[in-house]
Image (cartoon, rainbow, N blue to C red):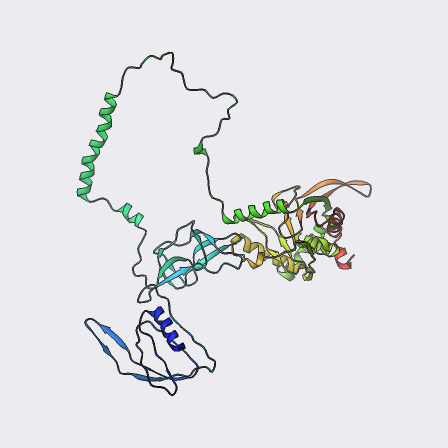
């Protein structure tokens, strides 16, 4: 009974007669074999006898049966192997949309990186899929020539959707028809017919125009001039000076998440200012030795990350999150770093920052920033995070109120360093100052904890020795 079910299933795949496998101590059976192959394995089968069935024009023939001895595994299993073809000779292969992540079900075909007729290598990107979070490449499964595209730019595609057809041998590849059609002139006979028809079409309106003119009629009392625009009516710019372009999936995702953040959280911001003198001096004194030993430049971001770690440990409520009627306290620190890219805002995550030193943090920041800018960052590298740092100072921002990145509960905003006169020891001296802002969910975090958190950031940045003494 099971053998019969397997035969029917394989028959539906191959569309031909199926193999029959002889169990041990049973009567021999024969099967037919075509160019397409199937392999069945079953516990307890020892020998397989087969006869080849060849189809010719006008007739057929059988070859002599041969006996094949096969060794099978002891476990019972049924395995079907077949090879997918786009043509009978196996020359054509299809490039499909790859798996894009557990939380991503579809994407938009953003653009093609190759054209029909181009040579492609194995795993060479031929198209890009834009998702809500990242851009994913569609690569060529085989080396060959790109024959044609079966999808268009702007189409919504899912994993497994066919994108292009690739010919391994390069046969049957057609170039873009539009270029050939534009290059080929029309046949002589067609050209003459067009020339004959053109004067008739052009002279007809001329005759009508000659008949149409008539003397202007005097205005009657009932006629009125078109209404003039009053001063109160707005003067809108002409439509030809406007451009309408569709939003990218990443931009739509960012817009949705930020608006959801405003609608969900009770957002409140508190501010402070930081004297950057000591941290900048530390960087200036040790930047060469740091670069020589660790192979990465010492920046200011690692100092703020370490300061945020200590502040989160002192105020664990800032590292927590509301989940329904519960509060989830997280005993680990994964800090997200907001990175602005040409395609939109992405927030990669530095894992376990509480166990990292300055060099490890700087290396991870550089790696994630490069991936974010070239579009190679993955979904896993942006998932999670317990706290976010946004540095608007790299763009010259003096002060801002950042928006929380859900499902986190707070975000730290860094800003530009400006030399301002400050009172130090009773004297007015110039100091490099930075405004810092903390936006937090007031449903969970009270103002007291928020201010203490920001004060801890200020104390550690102004005196980095606190990190060594843990005070």
Q: As drawn, is 310 to the left or to the right of 138? A: right
Which of 177 and 429 lies nearest the eye of the viewer? Answer: 177
Q: Who's the residue at 38% across and 61% down the image?
A: 94
Residue furthest to the front: 1
Residue drawn where x is 37% and y is 69% of the image: 83
Q: Position of residue 25 (x, y in %)?
A: 38, 88
Seen from the viewer's position, the closer of residues 210 and 468 is 210
Quarter of the image with the C terminus is: bottom right
In the foreground, 330 or 142 = 330
Task: Give the residue furthest to the bottom.
Answer: 25
Question: What is the x, y in percent for residue 246?
Answer: 47, 44
Specify the quadrant of the image occupied by residue 64. bottom left
Give the left or right position of residue 365, taking residue 62 as reference. Answer: right
Quadrant location of the N terminus in the rendered image? bottom left
**Drawn side of residue 442 relative to residue 195, left or right:** right
Q: Position of residue 61 (x, y in %)?
A: 23, 77
Q: Position of residue 282 (x, y in %)?
A: 71, 53
From the viewer's perspective, is residue 391 above or below residue 143? above
Horizontal side of residue 370 vs 32, given as left or right = right
Query: Total number of numbered labels?
Result: 0
């Amino acid at each position: 009974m099971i053998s019969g079910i397997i035969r029917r299933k394989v028959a539906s795949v191959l569309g031909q007669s199926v193999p029959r496998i002889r169990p041990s101590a049973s009567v021999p059976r024969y099967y037919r074999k075509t160019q397409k192959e199937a392999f069945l394995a079953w516990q307890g089968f020892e020998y397989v006898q087969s006869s080849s069935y060849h189809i010719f024009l006008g007739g057929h023939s059988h070859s002599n049966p041969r006996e094949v001895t096969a060794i099978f595994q002891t476990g019972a299993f049924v395995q079907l192997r077949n090879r997918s073809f786009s043509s009978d000779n196996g020359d054509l292969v299809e490039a499909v949309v790859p798996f894009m992540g557990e939380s991503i079900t579809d994407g938009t075909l953003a653009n093609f990186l190759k054209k029909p007729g181009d040579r492609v290598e194995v795993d060479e990107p031929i198209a890009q899929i834009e998702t809500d979070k990242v851009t994913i490449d569609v690569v060529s499964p085989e080396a060959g020539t790109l024959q044609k595209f079966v999808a268009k730019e702007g189409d919504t595609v899912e994993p497994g959707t066919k994108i292009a057809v690739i010919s391994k041998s390069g046969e049957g590849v057609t170039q873009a028809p539009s270029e050939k059609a534009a290059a080929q002139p029309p046949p002589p006979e067609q050209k003459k017919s067009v020339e004959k028809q053109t004067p008739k079409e052009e002279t007809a309106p001329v005759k009508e125009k000659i008949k149409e003119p008539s003397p202007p009629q005097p205005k009657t009392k009932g006629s009125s001039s078109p209404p003039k625009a009053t001063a109160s009516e707005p003067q809108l710019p002409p439509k030809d000076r406007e451009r309408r372009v569709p939003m990218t999936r990443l931009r739509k995702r960012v817009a949705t998440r930020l608006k959801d953040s405003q609608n969900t959280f009770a957002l409140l911001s508190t501010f402070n200012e930081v004297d950057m003198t000591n941290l900048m001096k530390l960087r200036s004194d040790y930047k060469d030795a740091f670069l020589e030993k660790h192979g990465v430049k010492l920046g200011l971001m690692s100092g703020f990350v370490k300061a945020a770690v200590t502040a989160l440990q002192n105020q664990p409520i800032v590292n927590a999150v509301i989940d329904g009627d519960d509060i989830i306290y997280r005993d680990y620190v994964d800090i997200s770093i907001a990175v602005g890219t040409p395609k939109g805002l992405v927030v990669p995550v530095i894992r376990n920052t509480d166990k990292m030193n300055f060099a490890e943090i700087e290396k991870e920041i550089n790696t994630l920033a490069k991936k974010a800018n070239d579009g190679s960052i993955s979904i896993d590298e942006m998932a999670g995070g317990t706290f976010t740092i946004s540095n608007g100072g790299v763009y010259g921002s003096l002060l801002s109120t950042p928006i929380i990145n859900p499902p986190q509960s707070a975000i730290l905003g860094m800003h530009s360093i400006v030399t301002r006169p400050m009172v130090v020891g009773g004297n007015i001296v110039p100091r490099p100052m930075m405004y810092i802002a903390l936006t937090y969910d007031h449903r969970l975090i009270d103002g007291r904890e928020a201010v203490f958190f920001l004060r801890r950031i200020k104390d550690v940045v102004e005196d980095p020795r606190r990190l060594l003494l843990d005070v």
